[in-house]
């Protein structure tokens, strides 16, 4: 059935997608009207239940959120900083509590107090200027530190569009396989979490015989604590577009889709402007500069759902289907968007291609460690003296990054690194870690997207576990039982324990974690036990009283 839905959804292509149309319909009241949904179902030849099922999934489409006027960030960094109660109480002076919704996360982890109003994000002291924001729609750009420790590649100042795209023009004159070989040589591994070699993925897609193929940029950076993709999209948009053009060239894909999260409205604008700049210059479209290569971009604005960052849920989302994770195989490189061969890559992975194409794969491979090549962006939260985006050579000691950021503002006891599915690193382990995939994995953690959320000394670890389960249950796509039920049960158990209603049976709890880890279909349910196990291991004393033998 869903195979047919993919084909049906693909009839109109990405330019006029069911999903974008749903988003447009929700702009006025916060949710599409039922008659509009019926009309859309008819137009796209899909069942009404399918369109309804999609609409009720997303924060910005679901009927429950109708009438919400302002949203407060409840991501892990804002929760740990403890700033959001004050934000809510200030907002309640101007809005009815029913008009205030929640968003996770706005990527303002470097200054917290984050909220979203009328298509713009605000943070830091913006809440003090609420009157101006509401009356004048005053914009308030956030500021954060951007620094390279070692080689500066992804954060290097932008030269000019003319200069920047020279390596692309040069590549267009080369054989596709020659260009691909440089990417393979670089051993660039995906920055979205799994670390899969990019060159291999491009090659799988290249080998598929199909007139229609897609390159998708996964700009759904949903990990609370991470805002490095936001930085690239807002400040270095051409690096992302460049990477997609090269990926399109080597695979034979003609379409590039940027799936950008709704929580990053400014990113949508900057990327669209960059696309238009390329269009004006004639560097995208049909038969680019007479090379025979055609490529164009389409932005799809997401509608608020963490699981859409998982690549197959993301594909379902673009198709206007309920974004449930797909069973693999087939992999997206064989059957992805509209069942066509598709490469999905993270923003940062794509941004690395400029250096590789300009300087060669060997040059990238020489940076970092043998298995983790190149540089990596790290997002630091407001507990650092100089929070911001730090570009580090893979293999850089974690201690060095903390030092470069001026150390911590206040005492912390641990950090969650790599998003909600990343490990919880106690301060005493900092000295053992280097920023690369292997160092983290060998020490029982996960590099992930390398975002750092600090957990202050006085933040209860049991509360942190409860927050993780709450997040995982809310964001579960519901496709498989271990995650759909397990995250909910985990939340009930931990919430009850915090409220003094129950003690947790440790055997049952371990069994639950094991079931999640082993039985979940994707890394959402499969990954959430890692930080919890870290806490059980490193903070046993602190949380012991919540458990019974
Ligand atoms: C629950 C979940 C959320 C994810 N969220 C993101 C995300 O926000 N951005 C991202 O690039 N990858 C995310 N991923 C990883 C993607 O599924 C996929 O591996 C990635 O986009 C591939 O790109 P890469 O090879 O360049 O890393 C997520 C995976 C899971 C399981
Ligand atoms: S683990 Fe969770 S998010 Fe992943 S497929 Fe199962 S229900 Fe969906």
Image: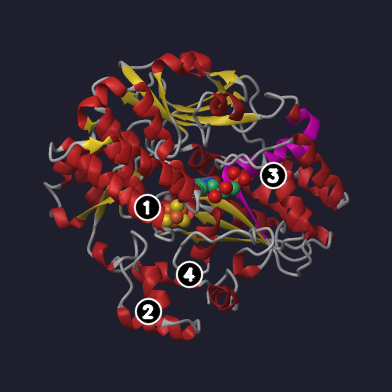
Q: Is residue 405 above or below residue 527?
A: above
Which residue does the image show at 42% across and 46% down from the upper left? 516
- Numbered tag placed on residue 320 in the rendering: 4
* Magenta span includes 123: no
Q: CA distance from mark 3 to mark 4?
A: 27 Å
Upstream in sequence: badge 2 or badge 3: 2
Above or below residue 1? Residue 171 is above
Q: Earlier in the sequence, mark 3 or mark 1?
A: 3
Examine the rendering and report whether any part of residue 335 can be seen: yes
Residue 367 picture location, percent across and down: 71, 24
Element on which disc 2 rests: helix
Query: Mark 4 or 1 closer to N-term?
Result: 4
- The answer to whether marks 3 and 1 mark residues whose Cβ atoms lie closer than 8 Å is no
Residue 95 is left or right of residue 517, and the answer is left
Residue in view at x 68 percent, y 58 percent:
333
Q: Which mark is residue 37?
A: 2
């Amino acid at each position: 059935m869903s195979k047919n839905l993919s084909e049906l959804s693909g009839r109109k292509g990405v330019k006029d997608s069911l999903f974008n149309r749903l988003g447009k319909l929700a702009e006025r009241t916060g949710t599409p009207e039922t008659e509009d949904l019926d009309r859309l179902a008819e137009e796209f030849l899909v069942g009404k239940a399918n369109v309804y099922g999609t609409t009720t999934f997303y924060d910005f489409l679901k009927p429950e959120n109708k009438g919400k006027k302002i949203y407060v960030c409840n991501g892990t960094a804002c929760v740990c900083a403890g700033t959001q109660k004050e934000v809510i109480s200030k907002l309640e002076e101007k809005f009815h509590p029913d008009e205030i919704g929640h968003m996770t996360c706005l990527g303002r982890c470097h200054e917290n107090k984050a909220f979203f109003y009328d298509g713009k994000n605000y943070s830091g002291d913006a809440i003090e200027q609420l009157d101006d924001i509401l009356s004048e729609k005053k914009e308030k750009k956030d500021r954060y530190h951007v620094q390279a420790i070692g080689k500066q590649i992804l954060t290097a100042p932008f030269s000019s569009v003319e200069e920047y795209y020279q390596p692309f023009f040069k590549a267009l004159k080369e054989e596709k396989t020659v260009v691909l070989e440089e990417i393979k040589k670089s051993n660039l591994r995906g920055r979205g979490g799994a670390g899969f070699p990019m060159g291999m993925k491009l090659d799988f897609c290249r080998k598929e015989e199909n007139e229609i193929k897609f390159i998708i940029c996964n700009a759904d950076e949903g990990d609370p604590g991470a805002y490095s993709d936001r930085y690239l999209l807002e400040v270095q948009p051409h690096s992302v577009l460049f990477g997609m053009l090269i990926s399109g060239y080597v695979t034979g894909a003609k379409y590039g889709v940027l799936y950008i999260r709704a929580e990053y409205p400014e990113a949508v604008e900057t990327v669209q402007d960059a696309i238009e700049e390329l269009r004006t210059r004639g560097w995208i479209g049909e038969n680019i500069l007479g090379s025979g290569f055609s490529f164009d971009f389409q932005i799809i604005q997401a509608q608020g759902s963490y699981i859409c960052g998982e690549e197959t849920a993301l594909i379902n989302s673009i198709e206007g289907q309920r974004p449930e994770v797909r069973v693999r195989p087939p992999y997206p490189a064989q059957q992805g968007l509209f069942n066509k061969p598709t490469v999905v890559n993270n923003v940062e992975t794509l941004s690395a291609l400029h250096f590789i194409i300009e300087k060669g794969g060997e040059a990238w491979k020489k940076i970092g460690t043998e298995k983790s090549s190149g540089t990596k962006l790290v997002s630091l939260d407001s507990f650092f003296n100089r929070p911001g985006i730090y570009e580090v050579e893979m293999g850089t000691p974690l201690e060095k990054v903390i030092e470069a950021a001026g150390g911590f503002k206040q005492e912390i006891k641990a950090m969650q690194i790599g998003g909600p599915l990343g490990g919880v690193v106690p301060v005493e382990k900092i000295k053992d870690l280097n920023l690369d995939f292997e160092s983290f994995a060998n020490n029982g953690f996960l590099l992930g997207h390398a975002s750092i959320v600090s957990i202050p000394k006085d933040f209860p670890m049991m509360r942190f576990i409860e927050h993780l389960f709450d997040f995982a249950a809310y964001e579960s796509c519901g496709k498989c039982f271990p995650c759909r039920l397990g995250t909910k049960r985990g939340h009930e158990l931990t919430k009850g324990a915090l409220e003094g209603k129950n003690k947790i049976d440790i055997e049952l709890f371990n069994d639950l974690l094991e079931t999640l880890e082993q039985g979940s279909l994707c890394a959402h349910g499969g990954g959430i036990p890692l930080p919890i196990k870290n806490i059980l291991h490193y903070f046993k004393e602190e949380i012991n009283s919540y458990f019974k033998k």
